[in-house]
Image (cartoon, rainbow, N blue to C red):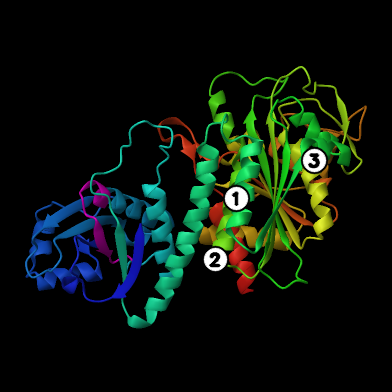
């Protein structure tokens, strides 16, 4: 898919299609009015007949409009002008792209930058249009014997801006949007792969390939035997139940000055989660291949940062393992010693993500990080609390939490902060070890973060629980690629500050 930006009048565009907006009730956008004037009222006459009300997502494709050089004009409903905000804008674009792709318009000129989205500038509108387009066109049919691809697919979108001085802004927005989309697609591809393919070894191979592709990226892989000899008893308690050995995967990107402390992203990479001895119910267990959504998310964010050549030192760490109910698997009641030296009573083997993460968090102390952000499909409680709309955010550092929340608002990949009060810590008390790995049903998302916080005393840290946002169930089942947009916006903002 190609994207471009230009400045010009709508009636002079030589294109397969020109796209303009219509608001409720039957109000043409500014460029729509210009086309209507050139065509001697052709558009307004059709609208007056009631063919287009302007409701959000409504489409009307017109052919051979008088005095217009393009083959077609696509009118897209934008809903009520006063209510036209982020979600309406993205939904509108998705409908435009689907229509263009289905009707054989292989290229189009879109007048999106003229639409007034509350509080958003041209850069945001064009970048979001690129990301929404790529997201709409994304497919994962790697394992299908026949492809359902369109016969004449959409190949190029050109965004029109109102003045030539906005061309550079548009070009930069396209560059960012493409990089974020590349990272998001990488995350979606990894998570959508079946678990008999995307195991810990496969993730390690993908990291190694990435380091070979970019000269400023290096890779290190630690095998399960090394993790065990190092003292990662919590991590190995999870991985030893599988025939697939666990891996700690480290990617380093040296884009900043040598003396700058790195940002570290840590991803939960449970490539399949049966629950272990605390076996999950069989229904929808296939979706447990998405339990490496955190690993996929940090991998995708790393790809975006490298693509954009951000002036930042970035380290990605993935704790990759399978959680299986083998004879060597850990049992409820087992006590293990973490890399930090703290002991953990395993009360539920299905609370395994925090076990691999806690050792990974201790491991990253050696990098003397500026900040550490871990990402994990950690708790079903987060799905109950926030649904699929926002990721849960908990942090021991208020400025970091604030920056992540702002990045979520900017990117549309929202997060919501939950408290990390000491009051919740006592739920993790154990009669036999320093702590238990679960804190009971109340405040499950918070107590999981409280557990991780015990391994983050030496750095500024934030935790993103993406259990509700990393994938969709039902007819649209699949990975969303979140929180790649949020994390990459955070990294971009750091480089601008």
Q: Position of residue 218 (x, y in %)?
A: 69, 57
Badge 1 or badge 3: first in the primary sequence:
1
Q: Secondary structure at mark 1?
A: helix
Q: Secondary structure at mark 2?
A: loop
Q: CA distance from mark 1 to mark 3?
A: 34 Å
Q: Which mark is residue 329?
A: none
Where is mark 1, residue-wise? 209
Q: Which residues are magenta?
A: 99-112
- Give the class, few, some or many, for how many residues have Cα within 10 Å of label 1's Cα (few <14, many ≥20): few
Q: Is residue 81 left or right of residue 333?
A: left
Q: Is residue 373 magenta?
A: no
The mark closer to the camera, 2 or 1, is 1
- Give the class, few, some or many, for how many residues have Cα within 10 Å of label 2's Cα (few <14, many ≥20): some
Q: Which mark is residue 451?
A: 3
Q: Position of residue 187 (x, y in %)?
A: 54, 46
Q: Is residue 102 magenta?
A: yes
Q: Is residue 493 left or right of residue 119?
A: right
Q: CA distance from mark 2 to mark 3?
A: 35 Å
Q: Quick check: marks 2 and 1 in contact, CB under 8 Å?
A: no
Using the image as rendered, state which of residue 120 and residue 289 is in the foreground: 289
Q: Is residue 293 left or right of residue 447?
A: left
Quarter of the picture holding the N terminus: bottom left
Instruction: Report if residue 350 is visible in the image.
Output: yes
Q: Quick check: marks 2 and 3 in contact, CB under 8 Å?
A: no
Where is mark 2, residue-wise? 308
Instruction: Report if residue 120 is visible in the image.
Output: no
- Where on the picture, by quarter, is residue 405? bottom right
Q: Position of residue 20 (x, y in %)?
A: 24, 63
Question: What residue appears at the point 37 percent right and 54 percent down from the top-left corner?
Answer: 133
Q: Quick check: marks 1 and 3 in contact, CB under 8 Å?
A: no
């Amino acid at each position: 898919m190609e994207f471009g930006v230009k400045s010009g009048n709508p009636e002079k565009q030589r294109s397969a299609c020109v796209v303009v907006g219509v608001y409720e009730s039957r109000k043409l956008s500014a460029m729509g009015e210009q086309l209507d004037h050139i065509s001697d009222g052709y558009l307004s006459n059709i609208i007056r007949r009631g063919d287009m009300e302007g409701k959000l997502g409504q489409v009307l494709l017109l052919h051979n409009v008088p005095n217009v050089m393009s083959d077609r004009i696509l009118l897209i409903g934008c809903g009520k002008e006063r209510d036209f905000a982020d979600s309406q804008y993205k939904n509108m674009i998705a409908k435009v792209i689907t229509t263009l792709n289905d009707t054989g318009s292989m290229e189009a000129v879109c007048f999106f930058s003229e639409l007034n989205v509350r509080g958003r500038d041209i850069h945001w509108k064009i970048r979001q249009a690129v990301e929404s387009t790529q997201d709409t066109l994304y497919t994962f049919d790697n394992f299908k014997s026949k492809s359902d691809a369109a016969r004449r697919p959409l190949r190029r979108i050109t965004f029109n801006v109102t003045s030539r001085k906005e061309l550079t802004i548009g070009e930069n927005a396209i560059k960012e949007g493409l990089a974020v989309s590349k990272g998001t697609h990488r995350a979606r591809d990894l998570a959508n792969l079946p678990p008999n393919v995307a195991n810990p070894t496969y993730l390690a191979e993908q990291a190694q390939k990435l380091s070979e592709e970019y000269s400023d990226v290096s890779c290190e892989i630690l095998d399960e035997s090394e993790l065990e000899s190092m003292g990662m008893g919590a991590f190995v308690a999870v991985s030893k139940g599988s025939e697939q050995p666990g891996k700690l995967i480290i990617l380093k990107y040296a884009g900043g000055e040598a003396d700058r402390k790195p940002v570290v992203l840590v991803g939960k990479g449970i490539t399949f989660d049966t629950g272990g001895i605390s076996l999950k119910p069989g229904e929808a267990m296939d979706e447990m291949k998405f339990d490496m959504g955190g690993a996929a998310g940090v991998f995708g964010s790393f790809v975006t940062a490298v693509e954009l050549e951000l002036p930042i030192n970035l380290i990605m760490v993935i704790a990759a393992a399978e959680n299986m109910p083998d004879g060597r698997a850990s049992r409820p009641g087992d006590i293990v010693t973490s890399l930090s030296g703290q002991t953990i009573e395993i009360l539920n083997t299905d609370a395994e993500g925090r076990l691999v993460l806690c050792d990974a968090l201790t491991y990253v102390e050696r990098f003397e990080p500026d900040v550490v952000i871990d990402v994990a499909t950690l708790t079903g409680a987060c799905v109950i609390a926030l649904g699929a709309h926002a990721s849960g955010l908990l942090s021991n550092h208020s400025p970091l939490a604030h920056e992540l929340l702002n990045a979520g608002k900017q990117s549309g990949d929202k997060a919501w902060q939950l408290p990390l009060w000491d009051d919740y810590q006592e739920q993790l008390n154990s009669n036999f070890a320093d702590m238990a790995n679960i804190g009971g049903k109340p405040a499950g998302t918070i107590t999981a973060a409280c557990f991780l916080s015990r391994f983050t005393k030496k750095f500024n840290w934030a935790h993103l629980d993406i259990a509700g946002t990393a994938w969709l169930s039902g007819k649209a089942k699949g990975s969303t690629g979140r929180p790649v947009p949020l994390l990459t916006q955070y990294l971009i903002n750091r480089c601008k500050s």
